[in-house]
């Protein structure tokens, strides 16, 4: 079937009915976060006195804006938690909750940018009766990857000006088909970068060491890659949006939901010049965010946490000032934010060191002087498997095995594993392992290293099959086709399997079904998303992780203590590989994220407190207070701590907040969001859901290569991709795992691998 290469942009996104948990409210407010009663989870925490007691309920409606509402409130409506009766409610349709920002908004990604909303020329309809797009909508599509009737592309990677012009003509004409580009031999599978500006990780590191700042990508050209970018992503994410080619690209500033706040209006973290404005992060940790107790989910397993970390590394990476420049216990505020330790701190190691050293995030060169300090995202804003492949052409070459299309996966003890210097691992007692991957954080925890290994194996598995199906393809074609498929698998897992479990009932309203690519949406990652809201996953870290043998008995190596698996990648290769750990994770309940285990607040790296780092990171990035984001999400203005009772149900927790902070206007975003009770059927509170959900919607809807966008894959290929699942990927890329959950993130019954649906890659045969 012929498909259009590209169409004209649609004029308006369809509005529609979103499912809700209660009938429409006349006041038009979001009243939606219900914490279901869980008898097993209502036990009192020893040190936090946290009890899930009074359920509340959230319905989503839309109100007419008043003179006092902000532009974003006019778009999404206010967000408020409201008590509900125990009488069972019928599910009825209500007005849909537009994402934050809505599809009619424009996000600026300038160094001092924040989300700016443009008032639409006509008010969109609040309800729709069908999910079909309006008649005046034409979907922008990307050309299909393959065609059975056309020859393979020429092997040359550089096109003549005449050929480039011809590619542009085909792309600009919505009536032409992809077959024309294939039949004329114009398609290439090699990204050309000789005539456009790029930024590499090496250049970022050099600038950071020399100048304590990082360069940004300010310009690019899509002309030389027209014949490539009709089918494949660039490594750095440029030219995804053909009209705004820097949107979502790597080495670009984060966008912001609210303007920055600094003590000097430019760069000094809140509390650094005026300590009375914020309490000590270490005090906050001891009193509020750290707990010996652990409440686990009865539904979901520990893979929720570990896969979430992998996805967070796919979407964002912030450069830090080198730790060598932050080795003293004093505030060198441009580089270091040391947190002093009180004499009564129970941690002897912290008292001995007298402080917790926290390196600041590296600013973008030029920011922080006359304009507020801004931070840079080293990764693309898209879900594109960048932890495997890297985010620039220069870096991607390091991980490839010559020109074969394969990734480097050397054999160690007969098992393919990520690259490392094997000469430093002659015996278990003298083994030093530092893996190399597309994201340098691969060695943070062995569970993360396991996912890197599994998805790298998946790439090579796909390359091998495609090479058998299409022996005429060269290594470049094999590499980029496999990369495209792996990225699509990740997207399918995130939006079908993982994210709905995080957001619960709010998913259908805040993210919803895919309605097509919208070039007016900016997928750039929000600063508050990566440096605050998405760090809820730190609350899911557990003290121990099970390791199980093929019969699901305890492994001979025993359970893995978190601190033993942190920065100790040798554990992965010397103690059974990824299989025992993965098998244990899908058999172990995930911890709910409302508190951090003392493993990461007292024992991490010997003298580091992860909670303190998170609090300081928010201040480093200039985040306004938690209450400002509650207002942004429509939950109303909070002037007293009792005003937080609908989001933070436990009275003792609110009293501790008041004791530590004194004023609601001083609560840090990460702290307030973490302490909120979870949304109905979800794992996070309403403020985190309000930031995380819309970001994933923008990431999806602003991605021209999102796998469900018509034309990215053929219909037959898309049908196969919809069979993909994390359980299937585990089955295909493990050595000894033969039983998995049918739904990878759910606890419960295990299914033989031969009963898990599998993609048929023959649909990629030419």
Image (cartoon, rainbow, N blue to C red):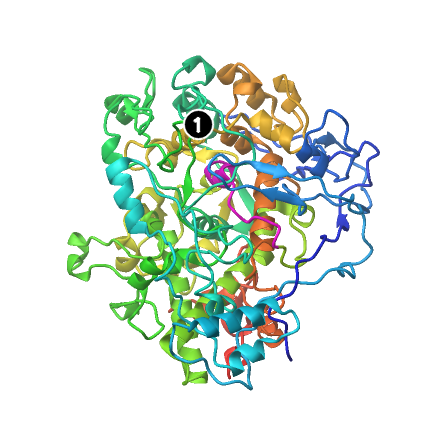
Q: Residue 523: image x %, image y %?
A: 55, 49
Q: Is residue 503 at all visible to an observer of this figure?
A: yes
Residue 533 visible, this angle: no
In the image, is residue 89 part of the stretch drawn in magenta?
A: no
- Residue 339 to residue 750: above or below: above
Q: Which quadrant holds the N terminus? A: bottom right
Q: Secondary structure at mark 1?
A: helix
Q: Position of residue 312 (x, y in %)?
A: 46, 48
Looking at the image, residue 31 lies above or below residue 728: above
Q: Judge from the rendering whether residue 289 lies leftward or rightward of residue 409; answer left or right.
A: right
Q: Position of residue 258 (x, y in %)?
A: 56, 31
Comparing 465 with 100, the one in front is 100
Residue 90 vs residue 480, the one in the foreground = 480
Q: Report which residue position mark 1 lands on.
A: 619
Q: In the image, is residue 525 part of the stretch drawn in magenta?
A: yes
**Residue shown at the point (48%, 37%) measured from the top left:** 294
Q: Foreground: 335 or 111?
A: 111
Quarter of the image for residue 493 reads bottom right
Badge count: 1
- Tell me which corner region of the image, top left, top right, bottom left or bottom right, holds residue 399: bottom left
Give the quadrant of residue 370.
top left
Specify start and end residues of the magenta stretch as a single range. 519-536
Mark 1 closeness class: few <14, some 14–19, many ≥20 residues within 10 Å: many
């Amino acid at each position: 079937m012929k498909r259009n290469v590209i169409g004209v942009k649609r004029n308006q996104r369809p509005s529609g009915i979103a499912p809700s948990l209660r009938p429409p409210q006349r006041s038009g407010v979001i009243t939606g976060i219900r914490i279901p009663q869980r008898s097993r989870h209502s036990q009192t925490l020893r040190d936090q006195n946290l009890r899930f007691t009074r359920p509340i309920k959230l319905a989503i409606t839309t109100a007419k804006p008043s003179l006092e509402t902000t532009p974003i409130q006019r778009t999404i409506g206010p967000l408020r938690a409201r008590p509900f009766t125990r009488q069972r409610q019928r599910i009825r349709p209500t007005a849909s909750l537009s994402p934050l920002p809505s599809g009619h908004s424009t996000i600026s990604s300038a160094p001092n940018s924040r989300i700016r909303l443009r008032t639409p020329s006509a008010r969109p309809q609040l309800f729709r009766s069908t999910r079909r797009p309006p008649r005046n909508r034409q979907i922008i599509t990307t050309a299909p990857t393959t065609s059975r009737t056309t020859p393979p592309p020429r092997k040359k990677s550089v096109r003549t000006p005449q050929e480039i012009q011809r590619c542009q003509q085909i792309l600009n004409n919505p009536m032409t088909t992809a077959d024309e580009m294939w039949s004329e031999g114009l398609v290439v599978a090699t990204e050309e970068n000789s005539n456009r500006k790029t930024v590499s990780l090496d250049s970022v590191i050099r600038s950071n060491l020399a100048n304590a700042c990082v360069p940004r990508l300010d310009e690019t050209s899509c002309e030389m890659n027209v014949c490539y970018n009709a089918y494949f992503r660039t490594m750095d994410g440029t030219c995804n949006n053909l009209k705004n080619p820097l949107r979502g690209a790597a080495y670009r500033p984060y966008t912001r939901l609210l303007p920055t706040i600094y003590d000097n209006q430019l760069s000094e973290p809140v509390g650094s010049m005026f300590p009375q404005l914020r309490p000590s992060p270490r005090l906050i940790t001891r009193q509020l965010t750290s707990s010996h107790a652990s409440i686990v989910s009865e539904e979901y397993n520990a893979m929720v946490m570990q896969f979430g970390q992998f996805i967070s590394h796919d979407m964002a990476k912030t450069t830090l000032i080198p730790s060598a420049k932050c080795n003293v216990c004093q505030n060198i505020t441009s580089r270091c934010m040391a947190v002093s330790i009180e004499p009564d701190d129970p941690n002897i190691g912290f008292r001995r060191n007298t402080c917790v050293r926290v390196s600041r995030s590296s600013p973008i060169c030029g920011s922080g002087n006359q304009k507020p300090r801004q931070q840079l995202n080293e990764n693309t804003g898209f879900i594109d498997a960048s932890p495997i492949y890297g985010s620039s052409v220069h870096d991607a070459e390091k991980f490839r095995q010559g020109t074969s299309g394969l990734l480097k996966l050397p054999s160690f003890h007969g098992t393919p594993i990520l690259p490392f210097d094997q000469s430093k691992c002659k015996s278990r007692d003298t083994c030093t392992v530092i893996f190399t991957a597309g994201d340098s954080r691969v060695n943070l925890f062995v569970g993360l290293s396991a996912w890197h290994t599994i998805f790298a194996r998946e790439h090579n598995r796909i390359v091998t099959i495609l090479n058998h199906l299409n022996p005429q393809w060269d290594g470049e074609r094999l590499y980029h086709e496999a990369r495209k498929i792996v990225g699509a698998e990740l997207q399918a897992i995130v939006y079908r399997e993982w994210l709905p479990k995080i957001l619960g009932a709010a998913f259908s309203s805040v993210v919803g079904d895919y309605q097509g690519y919208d070039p007016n949406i900016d997928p750039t990652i929000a600063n508050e998303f990566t440096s605050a809201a998405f760090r809820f996953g730190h609350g899911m870290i557990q003290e121990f992780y099970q390791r199980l043998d093929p019969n699901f008995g305890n492994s001979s190596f025993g359970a893995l203590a978190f601190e033993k698996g942190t920065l100790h990648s040798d554990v992965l290769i010397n103690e059974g590989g990824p299989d025992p750990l993965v098998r244990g994770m899908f058999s172990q309940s995930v911890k709910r994220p409302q508190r951090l285990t003392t493993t990461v607040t007292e024992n991490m790296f010997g003298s580091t407190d992860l909670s303190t780092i998170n609090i300081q990171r928010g201040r480093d990035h200039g985040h306004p207070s938690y209450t400002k984001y509650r207002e942004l999400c429509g939950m109303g203005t909070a002037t007293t701590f009792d005003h937080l009772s609908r989001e933070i149900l436990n009275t003792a927790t609110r009293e501790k907040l008041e004791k530590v902070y004194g004023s609601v206007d001083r609560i840090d975003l990460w702290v307030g969001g973490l302490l909120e009770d979870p949304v109905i059927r979800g794992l996070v509170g309403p403020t985190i859901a309000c930031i995380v959900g819309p970001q994933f919607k923008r990431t999806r809807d602003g991605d021209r290569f999102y796998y469900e966008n018509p034309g990215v894959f053929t219909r037959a290929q898309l049908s196969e991709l919809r069979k993909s699942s994390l359980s299937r990927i585990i089955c295909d890329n493990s050595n000894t795992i033969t039983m998995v959950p049918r739904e990878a993130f759910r606890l419960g019954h295990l299914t033989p691998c031969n009963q898990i649906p599998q993609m048929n890659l023959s649909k990629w045969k030419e």
